[in-house]
């Protein structure tokens, strides 16, 4: 069953790749880059929306399928989600809700929005740091094996 699913997914991704490549070539060779009224821009925009939706669907459905085929792996997924939630609370705690006059008056940003944006930035920095540390750590471990 898994082999059939992976075969269909592989061919679907090949089709997406071919269509994306063709669309890119058509854009580069067949349009005037200064003419923004061309409909190719609309096609590329809608195609990018479709790709984002397909990616989001795969990101949600793939772990669910994995849980069906490997229920023991649910513990690892729950641990990963718990770690992400803990990192979010740490990020939210580190974020500041301080605003300048320009941010509050001219841009209309509230203190809550500022805090959430700051938390998102801290979350990104922390997860990036952990990813880099895990790459370095696994490289060092492989050296000493």
Image: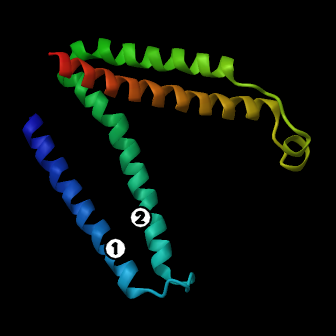
> Which residue appears at 40% of the width and 43% of the height?
56
> Which residue appears at 49% of the width and 75% of the height?
41
Q: Are marks 1 and 2 in contact (CB under 8 Å)?
A: yes
Marked residue nearer the N-terminal end (1 or 2): 1
> Which residue appears at 91% of the width and 41% of the height?
101
Per the model, the C-alpha gap separating discs 1 and 2 is 9 Å
Q: Which mark is residue 59?
A: none
Q: Quadrant location of residue 116?
A: top right
Q: Position of residue 69 (x, y in %)?
A: 18, 24
Q: Quadrant location of residue 62?
A: top left
Residue at which label 1 appears: 23
Position above or below: 113 against 145: below
Q: Nearer the viewer, residue 106 or 18?
A: 106
- Give neighbour class at mark 2: few <14, some 14-19, many 20+ (Cα, 10 Å): some
Relative to residue 92, is residue 56 drawn left or right?
A: left
Name the secondary structure under disc 2.
helix
Position above or below: 39 against 72: below
Quadrant of the snapshot with the N terminus: top left
The image's colouring method is: rainbow
Position above or below: 139 against 117: above
Relative to residue 23, is residue 31 drawn left or right?
A: right
Q: Position of residue 82 (x, y in %)?
A: 45, 14
Relative to residue 106, is residue 61 drawn left or right?
A: left
Q: Position of residue 119 (x, y in %)?
A: 64, 28
Q: Nearer the viewer, residue 27 or 128?
A: 128
- Give neighbour class at mark 1: few <14, some 14-19, many 20+ (Cα, 10 Å): some
Residue at which label 2 appears: 47
Q: Nearer the viewer, mark 1 or mark 2?
A: 1
Name the secondary structure under disc 1.
helix
> Which residue appears at 19% of the width and 59% of the height?
14
Q: Quadrant location of residue 79?
A: top left
């Amino acid at each position: 069953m898994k082999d059939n699913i992976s075969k269909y997914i592989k061919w679907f991704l090949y089709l997406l790749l071919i269509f994306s490549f063709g669309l890119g070539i058509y854009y580069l060779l067949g349009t005037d880059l200064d003419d923004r009224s061309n409909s190719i821009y609309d096609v590329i925009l809608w195609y990018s929306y479709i790709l984002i939706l397909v990616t989001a669907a795969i990101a949600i459905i793939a772990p669910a399928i994995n849980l069906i085929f490997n229920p023991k792996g649910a513990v690892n997924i729950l641990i990963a989600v718990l770690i992400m939630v803990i990192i979010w609370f740490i990020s939210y705690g580190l974020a500041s809700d301080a605003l300048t006059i320009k941010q509050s008056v001219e841009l209309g940003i509230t203190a809550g929005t500022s805090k959430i944006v700051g938390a998102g930035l801290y979350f990104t920095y922390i997860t990036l740091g952990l990813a880099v540390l895990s790459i370095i750590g696994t490289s060092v471990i492989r050296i000493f094996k």
